[in-house]
Image (tube, rainbow, N blue to C red):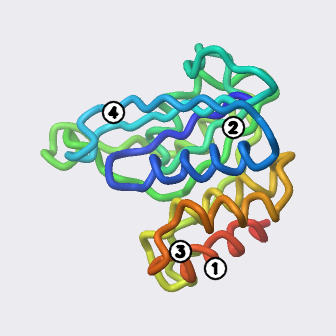
Amino acid sequence: MNIMIVGVGGQGTLLASRILGAAAQNIGMDVKLSEVHGMSQRGGSVVTYVRYGEKIASPIIEEGGADLILAFEQLEAYRYISYLKEGGTYIVNTQKTDPMPVICGTAKYPEEILEKIAAKGIDVIACDALALAKEAGNQKATNVALIGVLAKHSTIEKEDWMKALNSTVPPKFLEANLKAFELGYNHE
């Protein structure tokens, strides 16, 4: 299974990749992770490749090779569309984070991104993960709400996801993250 997690710095993409990797290890899979940081501390693009299966040699996913892309932000979803394989799954947080050119006023945030992705024949599972995280009591649990959506569409059993959360999320944040996961898992 080849999964890309894309977002911007500070959204929790790296924790999400560790949770995914732990869940895959819980079912006995060989897991490889690779993180690609842009200007992550300044809100730049962050990409994580997560590959798991019986035996994985390399963590890198080539264009057209991702079975699933989990996008924490709409513009990042659009930026990495070429990596999704035909028939792949696209889970996109409806949140928008202005990149530096938009903040500086030299560009405008593109409109109708989800519609543009769908127009390419891609089925998009859109989710307002920020709203789910706020409902869970911690807006920083947006990443785990998205992991919940991913979990619902994966072949990994829910109990293995719960073990992964318990082993990767710091105890003081666990309760809100478990709630966020449940809300994401039950998202329609």
Which one is earlier in the sequence, the residue at label 2 or at label 4? 4
Which one is earlier in the sequence, the residue at label 4 or at label 1? 4
Numbered badge on residue 37: 4
Does 186 appear above or below 126?
below
Q: Residues within 10 Å of mark 2 (few under 14, many from 20)?
A: few
Q: Residues within 10 Å of mark 3 (few under 14, many from 20)?
A: many
For mark 1, what is the residue?
A: 179
- Please give left or right for residue 139 compared with residue 158 in the image: left
Query: What amino acid is at disc 1?
Result: Lys
- State the CA–CA distance, disc 2 to disc 4: 27 Å
For mark 3, what is the residue?
A: 133
Which one is earlier in the sequence, the residue at label 1 or at label 2? 2
Q: Residues within 10 Å of mark 1 (few under 14, many from 20)?
A: many
- Describe the element under mark 1 as helix, strand or loop: helix
Query: What amino acid is at disc 2?
Result: Ala
Is disc 2 in contact with disc 3, using a CB cutoff of under 8 Å? no
